[in-house]
Image: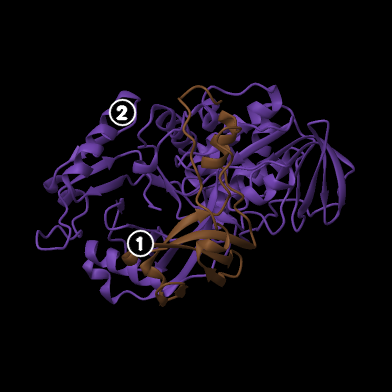
Amino acid sequence: MPFALLKYGLSRKYPAKHHFTPAKALKKHYDVVIIGGGGHGAAIAYNLAKYHGVRDVAILEKSYLGGGNTARNTAVIRSNYLTESGVEFYRESVKLYNNLSNEFNYNVMMENRGQLTLAHSDAAIRSFRWRAEVNKHLGVRSELVDRQTIAELVPNLNLSEDSRFPIMAGLWHADGATARHDAVAWGYAKGACERGVELHQLTEVEDIEISQGKVTGVKTNRGKISCGAVVQAVAGASSIVAKKAGIRLPIHSYPLQAMVTQPYKPILTPHVSSPHVHVYVHQTSRGEFVIGGGSDPYPLYNTRATLDQRESLSAAALELFPFLSQARLLRQWAGITDMTPDYSPIMGLSPVENYYLDAGWGTWGFKATPICGVTMAELIATKRVPSLIKPFELERFYRYQQINEAGATAASH
Amino acid sequence: MKLLRCPLNGLRNISEFTYGGEYHPMPDHHKTSARGWVEYVFFHDNTAGVVTEWWCHTPSSFWFLAERNTITDEVLRTFTVDEYHRQRIEFNHSPLGQDS
């Protein structure tokens, strides 16, 4: 990696390489069809091609690569969840993220800046202690910190006791990080295409063909394809696509809104989140403050931005960082989050044979991208469900074995 | 602020309302299997398009139904529950474990 970067820096032409071969005609058959060309879909294709020798793979994307929720998320990487299943799963994802630039030989701009979650009540402190102990037990760096430590970690945070919800303590997660979300999708897609995977953009799946309980093909706006297996990785449209395969999911889709300020000099290192005042803030490497986590109060398939959310997110962000009062907003946007009842994903087998689910990614999809690629590829190639994702299968709802991560999710619904 | 028309209280700010989920007729509680109940409780149609759903005017605790387009974010109409339910639902209790 460093040598490639050096070579590039010394070459005076700064050559821009094409990441992918241009789209070809669709073939009549693929071994595996991946619906959705976002980070997850590309990661599954990459792992299938690189580690399982499954190269006859097509990624079908109705728009363009990484243009859906991969582009809309706020790029938070962390593993400080509450349940054993959740912590182990996201812990492996963070490990993979730390090596992702080397894995791709492509810079995903991973930055290990840590994450601080704020407690404004005794109840929050109790739940943080619980999370910290579960995390430590499973090898994740989380600890409960006092106000003095918070002041050292984030000197410009408003720690006044006169504010409406004074900060009482924090959960410091040293493993917390951020990365360039587009680069993650590009890196995976580049690596997959170099190994024979075909990326077909502007290709929308209109119907899914099933015969005797088994998926046999998909109908697209560019013609029919027969295939051995299909995986859907369409965060934000999980219910809509699953319905084409006759599958109903425990999902409600809500818009989640975020916004970003104009760039400033570096002043805020960690990611700061407050579930109580409903906001999280971090400064990107470009200098912008990302202010996120405002969920609409009712389900909707529309990515419009609203004044209501702008007001509530601004109020909450100013409570934590009063110096942002003069900041100008550059953008406000929304992504559609597929919320499950237990705030955990739905991964693995579906009621239709050879049709695999990578759904229910709510507000936690970006951080799971690498581990999702590894585990879903293993499932598709070997037909055995990896133990890491076994707890997230759709069947868990029928056994009342939900994996409750509602308290460990930064955005509330 | 978006407005919603409560059948009892008239046009109000949407912040006064609570979303109550998709409207589905309750399954027959004598004939439905355990899996059927799970699907009734947890699974949703999550339709992109016009849906019928429960809403509650929070200050007055008044529950009613609405038809809303989940793509355009438009409320087509709101109406009281008696359009769908004219009769009281009787729950003939049977001891646990006898109907599954």
Q: Is residue A402 left or right of residue A173?
A: right
For the point 69% across and 23% down, the residue is: A383
Check the picture and name the quadrant holding the C terminus of chain B: top right
Instruction: Say which amino acid is labelled 1.
Output: Ser
Colour purple, chain: A
Q: Chain of mark 2?
A: A
Q: Nearer the viewer, residue A7 or A79?
A: A79
Q: Nearer the viewer, residue A108 or A32?
A: A32
Q: Which residue is mark 1?
A: B61
Q: Which residue is mark 2?
A: A134
Image quadrant where residue A370 sits: top right
For the point 20% across and 43% down, the residue is: A123
Q: Chain of mark 1?
A: B
Residue A179 position within the rendered picture, expressed as x and y whole percent measured from the top left: 46, 49
Residue at disc 1, secondary structure? loop
Residue A227 position within the rendered picture, expressed as x and y whole percent measured from the top left: 82, 36
Residue at disc 2, secondary structure? helix
